[in-house]
């Protein structure tokens, strides 16, 4: 693909940007955050007061020409770092002179988890998984308030012509294939979301099945609010590898072109069929002895792992209920009852 990405920074543009960057950095409550208060051509970081005096950085680029709003969120889970760096790198290069519309990057969506170096909000806060709390509760616990604040901000700023992206990864305990997903919302927004997912540049295309869990994620709730939405997963495995950041920054550049926010052409849109997934959750807690590998093709009824106790006695066999491909697997050798051991990509529509 090609796009008008200005690698050689124009001196005149820099001078203009320097002037615009004198625009004061403020601490804004989500309810006070208004795009109209920022000048055309603005490119800089602001600070957002999400809820309960929790401050997070927010990157804002206001294009020279009107167009959609692209809002990108990362680290809903505090042990997933690839999306944070992708937002930073994409934003640093983003040229407001050729941008049509607005970019907002929220690299730290869950500061409770990021600060605690944990997937969920840290235990002293409330220990909750932010990705199970949407659309949130303003009268609830800190993580539930945070969800309400994030959901309120995104649904107030974005509409059906805009785009929301939620970056995830396998974090410290899982490994995922690199994939891009959308929600089957059964409305006109579903088609927009699917087309944007196809343009993202990742060929593992995931139709995220509706479930109590998936509808309570940030991306699941926003998609159901009538906003075109995609979510991504990359490898994880406790690291932050440049090769896992690259598909995300590249994907954002492709989304700019696909949504008309940047001149260019994408000549390799993925038109393959989407796949749905089945999670395999364990019943027992214990030591997880895995026999499967990421990306492996498995048959119905295959044994993927055994859970044993501290004496090595068998507690549970983890088997597949459908044939498919291992799209995600737990990489941590201990598991608790109810946690996901595998995610199997099972069927194309
Ligand atoms: Zn995640």
Image: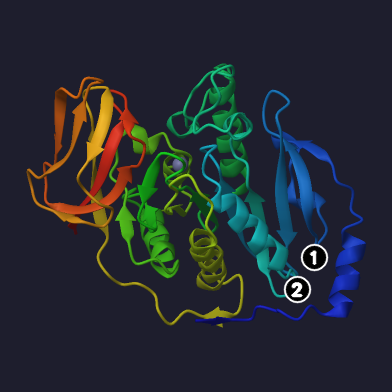
On screen, residue 257 versus residue 192, left or right, reads right
Judged from the image, the secondary structure of the residue bearing numbered disc 1 is loop
Give the number of callouts.
2
Q: Nearer the viewer, residue 193 or 118?
A: 118
Q: Nearer the viewer, residue 206 or 172?
A: 172
Q: In the image, is residue 333 above or below residue 343? A: above
- Spot occupied by residue 180 in the image (x, y as percentages of width and height): 39, 57
On screen, residue 45 versus residue 109, left or right, reads right
Q: Which residue is mark 1?
A: 41
Q: Which residue is mark 2?
A: 97
Q: How is the image coloured?
A: rainbow
- Residue 130 in sight in this render: yes
On screen, residue 261 versus residue 202, left or right, reads right
Answer yes or no: do the residues labelled 2 and 1 have beta carbons within 8 Å? yes
- For label 1, the crowd category at 10 Å Cα-Cα, with few meaning under 14, some 14 to 19 and many 20 or more, is many
Image quarter for residue 295?
bottom left
Return the mark for residue 69.
none
Judged from the image, the secondary structure of the residue bearing numbered disc 2 is loop
Q: In the image, is residue 73 above or below residue 112? A: below
């Amino acid at each position: 693909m090609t796009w008008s990405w200005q690698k050689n920074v124009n001196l005149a543009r820099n001078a203009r940007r320097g002037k615009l960057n004198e625009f004061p950095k403020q601490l804004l409550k989500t309810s006070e955050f208004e795009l109209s208060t920022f000048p055309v051509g603005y490119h800089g970081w602001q600070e957002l007061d999400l809820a309960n005096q929790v401050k997070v950085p927010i990157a804002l680029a206001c294009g020279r020409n009107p167009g959609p709003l692209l809002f990108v969120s990362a680290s809903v889970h505090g042990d997933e770092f690839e999306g944070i760096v992708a937002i930073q790198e994409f934003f640093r290069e983003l040229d407001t002179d050729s941008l049509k519309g607005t970019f907002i990057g929220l690299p730290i969506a869950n500061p409770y988890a990021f600060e605690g170096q944990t997937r969920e909000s840290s235990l002293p806060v409330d220990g909750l998984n932010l990705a199970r709390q949407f659309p949130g509760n303003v009268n609830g616990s800190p993580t539930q308030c945070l969800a309400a604040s994030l959901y309120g901000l995104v649904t107030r700023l974005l509409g059906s012509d805009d785009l929301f992206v939620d970056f995830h990864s396998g974090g410290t305990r899982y490994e995922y294939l690199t994939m891009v997903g959308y929600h089957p919302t059964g409305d006109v927004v579903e088609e927009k979301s699917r087309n944007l997912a196809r343009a993202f540049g990742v060929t593992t295309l995931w139709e995220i099945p509706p479930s109590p869990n998936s509808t309570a994620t940030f991306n699941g709730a926003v998609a159901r609010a009538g906003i075109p939405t995609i979510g991504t997963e990359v490898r994880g495995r406790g690291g932050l590898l440049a090769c896992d950041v690259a598909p995300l920054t590249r994907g954002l550049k492709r989304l700019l072109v696909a949504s008309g926010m940047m001149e260019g052409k994408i000549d390799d849109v993925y038109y393959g069929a989407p796949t749905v997934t089945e999670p395999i959750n364990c019943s027992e807690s214990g030591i997880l002895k895995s026999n499967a590998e990421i990306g492996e093709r498995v048959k119905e009824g295959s044994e993927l792992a055994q859970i044993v106790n501290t004496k090595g006695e068998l507690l549970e066999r983890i088997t597949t209920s459908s044939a498919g491909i291992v799209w995600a697997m737990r990489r941590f050798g201990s598991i608790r009852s109810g946690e996901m051991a595998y995610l199997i990509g099972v069927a194309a529509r």
